[in-house]
């Protein structure tokens, strides 16, 4: 599901540690943590119940549960905090309620600009990944450079800076620039142009 969202809308994912010592979960980059945790009231109830169950486990066994034990305790915590089933509501009604509640809590500017913010972060992450991949290819090619290879090898063939690779990096950088520019109001762009500042700097300040 997350992969499809990123491929369709343009954001990217980053790991976020939810429970220390456990595998991190993947979240959409640039979504504020307080917005992520805002609707997670049941998650908090599960964590509270899990803490009680873990304390009881330690009293009974004199040691912390292992990974399998933590999963079992987590399942019991989820069962104990499961709310009674409610009559299902139409999706459109739920979406309208969620949006109105989020705007009241965090402000319309954040909610309306959230997708552009996530797209900009996703484009920046892809540029960074492209640069890192190119650097890895360059380091690998320098270690595997054949004896007697001429200057052309280091300039293009085997350095990772092929036309295809460079073009992909430039396209990613151009996309990041376009998204950052699109997220800045037109008045801010005209003002910054008159003052001689770059669009990227204005986008960063606006963010």
Image (cartoon, rainbow, N blue to C red):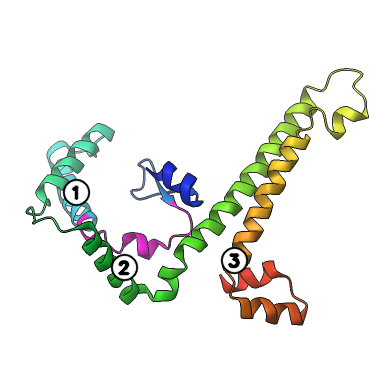
Which residue is the site of mark 3?
Answer: 182
Mark 1 neighbour density, 10 Å: few (under 14) some (14–19) many (20 or more): many
- Does the rendering let one see residue 56? no
User: Does residue 172 sit above or below 201 in this rendering?
Assistant: above
- Asked if the magenta segment contains residue 41, the reply would be yes
**Residue 50: mark:** 1
Q: Which residues are magenta?
A: 28-42
Q: Nearer the viewer, mark 1 or mark 3?
A: 3
Q: Nearer the viewer, mark 2 or mark 1?
A: 2
Is residue 57 shown left or right of residue 167?
left
Q: Residue at x 75, y 41 (%)?
A: 166
Q: If you read the primary sequence from the N terminus, does the residue marked by circle 1 or circle 3 appear first?
A: 1
- Asked if the magenta segment contains residue 104, the reply would be no
Which residue is the site of mark 2?
Answer: 99
Point out residue 50 in the picture as x, y percentages from the top left corner: 19, 48
Q: Residue at x 68, y 52 (%)?
A: 173
Is residue 40 shown left or right of residue 18?
left
The CA span between labels 2 and 3 is: 23 Å
Point out residue 33 in the picture as x, y percentages from the top left corner: 39, 61
Is residue 10 shown left or right of residue 25?
right
């Amino acid at each position: 599901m997350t992969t499809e969202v990123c491929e369709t809308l343009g954001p990217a994912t980053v790991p976020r540690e939810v429970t220390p010592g456990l595998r991190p979960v993947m979240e959409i980059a640039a979504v504020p943590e307080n917005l992520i945790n805002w609707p997670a009231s049941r998650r908090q109830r599960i964590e509270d119940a899990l803490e009680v169950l873990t304390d009881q486990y330690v009293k009974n066994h004199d040691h912390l549960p292992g990974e399998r034990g933590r999963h079992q305790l987590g399942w019991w915590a989820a069962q104990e905090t499961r709310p009674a089933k409610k009559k299902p509501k139409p999706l459109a009604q739920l979406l309208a309620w969620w949006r109105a509640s989020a705007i009241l809590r965090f402000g319309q500017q954040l909610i309306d600009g959230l997708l552009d913010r996530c797209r900009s972060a996703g484009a920046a992450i892809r540029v960074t990944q492209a640069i890192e991949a190119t650097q890895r290819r360059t380091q690998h090619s320098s270690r595997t450079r054949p004896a007697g290879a001429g200057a052309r090898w280091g300039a293009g063939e085997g350095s990772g800076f092929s036309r295809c690779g460079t073009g992909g990096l430039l396209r990613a950088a151009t996309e990041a620039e376009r998204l950052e520019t699109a997220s800045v109001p037109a008045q801010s762009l005209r003002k910054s142009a008159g003052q001689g500042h770059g669009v990227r700097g204005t986008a960063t300040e606006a963010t």
